[in-house]
Image (tube, grey):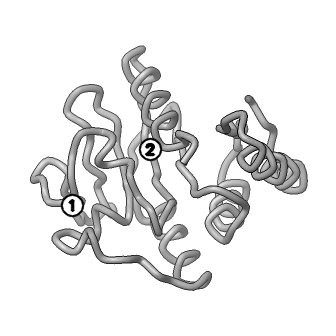
Amino acid sequence: GVGKSTTAVALARHLAARGKRVALLDVDLCGPSAPLLLGGGANDAHTAVVNTSYGWLPPKDSVHGVAVMSVQLLLGAARDTAVAWRGPRKAHLIRRFLRDTYWGRLDYLLVDTPPGTSDEHLTTIGALVDATHVDGVVLVTTPHALSLATVRREFTFCAKMRVPVLG
C-alpha cells in the first residue's frame, strides 16, 4: 500500500504521546494491520479483546496507551484466515465496532480504512455522521498515478458525504 495504516498508527501515537486519549479503529476488514503495527499480534495476551457488560473492551498498546479494535483481534489463532465477506456482513461488524466497543472518553478516534470508496467507507462515515461530529479525514497517497487516481475518488467521496478533508 501507500502507508495508510502506518500513518494512522504514527498519528495515534503522536497524539497519545501529547497526552490525548486516542483510539484506532481498523476497518480494513480484509487486510487488518493496526494491531501488528502497534506492536502486538492477535494471539498476544495484552492484545485480547475483553467482553464486558459495557461492551468490547479494546486492548491498548503498551507504550502510548492507544486503544485498538480490529477484526484481526477477533480472529485469534485464525488470524491468517482470509476474511472474504460481502457488504452486509462487513457493515454489521463495523456498526458493532462503533456501537459495542467501550472506548471510554476519547479525544480522538482514528479510523484506518482500506483503499478506495467501498462498503467500509460508506458504513463508517454514515454511522459516525449519524452519531457524532466528524472533524474530517486525512487522505494518504504516494505520487504514483494509480494512487493519485484513487485518492481523487476518495476526495470526491468525502465531498459527497459532506466530510471535510483535513489533509
Location of residue 81 in the rendering, given as x and y in whole percent from the top left corner: 30, 76
Location of residue 127 in the rendering, given as x and y in whole percent from the top left corner: 65, 62
Secondary structure type for disc 2: strand
**Picture quadrant of residue 101:** bottom left
The mark closer to the camera, 2 or 1, is: 2
**Please, is residue 151 above or below residue 89 in the view?**
above
| Along the viewing direction, whichever of 129 and 114 lies nearer the viewer | 114
Location of residue 82 in the rendering, given as x and y in whole percent from the top left corner: 37, 77
Q: Is residue 158 left or right of residue 8?
A: right
* Neighbour tally class for label 2: few under 14, some 14-19, many 20 plus, Cα within 10 Å: many
| Along the viewing direction, whichever of 29 and 49 lies nearer the viewer | 29
Q: What residue is drawn where x is 37% and y is 17%?
A: 17
Q: Is residue 53 left or right of residue 125?
A: left
Location of residue 162 in the rendering, given as x and y in whole percent from the top left corner: 86, 49
Q: Is residue 39 left or right of residue 113?
A: left
| Along the viewing direction, whichever of 11 and 18 lies nearer the viewer | 11
Q: What residue is drawn where x is 42% and y is 14%?
A: 18
Q: Earlier in the sequence, mark 2 or mark 1?
A: 2
| Along the viewing direction, whichever of 145 and 132 lies nearer the viewer | 145
Residue that numbered label 2 is attached to: 24
Q: What residue is drawn where x is 74% and y is 50%?
A: 146
**The label number, if any, that marks residue 9 in the structure image:** none
Looking at numbered disc 2 in the image, what kind of residue is underneath it?
A: Leu
Secondary structure type for disc 1: strand
Residue that numbered label 1 is attached to: 50
**Please, is residue 91 above or below residue 158 in the view?**
below
Looking at numbered disc 1 in the image, what kind of residue is underneath it?
A: Val
**Please, is residue 137 above or below residue 150 in the view?**
above
Separation of disc 2 and disc 1 at Cα?
Answer: 16 Å
Viewport quadrant of the C terminus: top right
